[in-house]
Amino acid sequence: MIYPITKNSEKFISQFPESFLNASKAEQEISAAIYRFLSKGHNPSIGEIAKETGHTAQTVEALRDGLNSGVFRNENEDIIGFGGLTSHKTKHTFTVNGITSYTWCALDALFIPEIIGKLAEVTSVCPVTKETIELSILRNKVVAVNPQSTVLSMVIAETEKITENLVNNFCHFVHFFSSESSAKEWIHSHENTFIVSLDDAMRLAHALNKTRYSLIL
């Protein structure tokens, strides 16, 4: 059964750490800039982020270092992955203006387009049927999807677990499925997971953005 998550969106959002949800304006501006850089296929340095946002390099570095498992860097300390978007290949491709990056999970592919203000072409694979899933997302709306029966899995996790490792304890349970029946087969063996419609997942992504980016969106 598809769970009406929008009726309980506050409960879903509340599983994330307060530091993740209640960011300062500087944190919101800096993280949005990182998303824009990564979506352009560029791994930004501290200096580039500072120049883009008008914040000092010291401010950017302090905020970056406080993000724990939410940020990944290369040997030059440039950011190669952040908050759901990465230059490293995953099963979820995220293409903007012909440039492809990747998201950690299905929900990332839904909320990031609104932050960067661009049309994103998303391609994923159903974990059960191995069927290709394609979406076009403009800001906070799905403008095209194939197959039409696409749904998502979601999870409610302990806040401490998400703080410890966002990717392993949340992202690994959030997928696109080609149909409700294939999603049912998968969640049967994954504790605390449930199915949501694509429309509800988009509303949830928007609600999450309005919470996380309340000062800049």
Image (cartoon, rainbow, N blue to C red):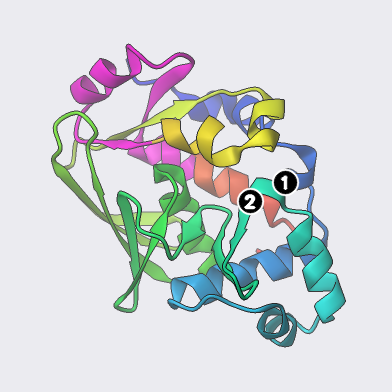
Above or below 36: residue 172: above
Q: Residue furthest front?
A: 75
Task: Identify the residue shown where x is 74% and y is 37%.
Answer: 17
Magenta-colored span: 175-203
Above or below 51: residue 6: above
Task: Identify the residue shown where x is 49% and y is 25%.
Answer: 155
Q: Find the distance from the CA under tag 1 to the CA under tag 2.
A: 9 Å
Disc 1 marks which amino acid?
A: Phe
Helix, strand or loop at mark 2: helix
164 sits to left or right of 96: right
Task: Identify the residue shown where x is 78% and y is 84%.
Answer: 54
Q: Is residue 196 magenta?
A: yes
**Residue hosting label 2:** 70
**Percent coordinates x, y for residue 176 in the rendering:** 31, 38
**Percent coordinates x, y for residue 212 in the rendering:** 69, 51
Residue 146 appears anywhere in the view: no
Disc 2 marks which amino acid?
A: Gly
**Residue hosting label 1:** 20
Give the foreground label among 1 and 2.
2
